[in-house]
Image (cartoon, rainbow, N blue to C red):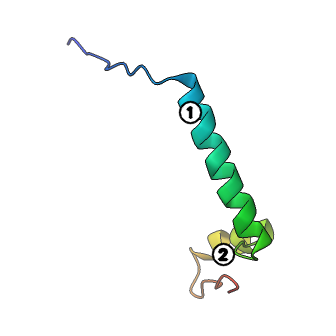
Amino acid sequence: METKVPLANIPLSLTREKTRRLTLEALADVDEGNAVDHRSVRARADSLDGDRPVLLPR
């Protein structure tokens, strides 16, 4: 079987700018209190197999 892999020529500066923008957006979310701590997310994920899933804090 022959396979083909499409290649994309994306300028490195474009990917760096996108990474920078997403990082700044994430930091703004944290500053505004729009984040959930890791322990809460982990507790939620671990509870999903049980009868009573843990809710994430608002």
Judge the density around disc 2: few (<14), some (14-19), many (≥20) Cα neighbours within 10 Å.
Answer: some
Looking at the rendering, which quadrant does residue 32 occupy? bottom right
Residue 36, quarter of picture: bottom right
Q: Quadrant of residue 15?
A: top right
Is 24 rendered above or below residue 40?
Answer: above
Point out the residue furthest to the left here: 1
Question: Is residue 13 found left or right of 11 in the rendered image?
Answer: right
Q: Secondary structure at mark 2?
A: helix
Q: Give the residue type at disc 1.
A: Thr
Task: Name the kind of residue labelled 2 in the image.
Answer: Arg
**In x, y percent, where is residue 25?**
66, 58
Residue 4, position in %: x, y? Answer: 26, 16
Q: Quadrant of the C terminus?
A: bottom right
Which tag, 1 or 2, sits closer to the chain's start? 1
User: Which residue appears at 76% of the width and 68% of the height?
Assistant: 30
x and y percentages locating residue 9 in the rendered image: 42, 19
Q: Which residue corresponds to mark 1?
A: 15
Task: Indicate left or right for 21 with 7 as reference.
Answer: right
Q: Residue furthest top?
A: 2
Quadrant where the N terminus sits is top left
**3D distance between C-alphas at marks 1 and 2:** 32 Å
Left or right of residue 5: residue 28: right
Between 2 and 32, the one nearer to me in the picture: 32
The residue that label 2 is drawn on is: 44
Tag shown at residue 5: none
User: Residue at the spot x=57%, y=75% of the render?
Assistant: 48
Rendered view: 16 above or below 44: above
Mark 1–mark 2 CB contact (< 8 Å): no
Q: Please state which of residues 48 and 33 is positioned toward the viewer in this rendering.
A: 33
Considering only vertical position in the picture, is 45 above or below 6? below
Give the vertical position of 32 relative to 51 (above or below).
above
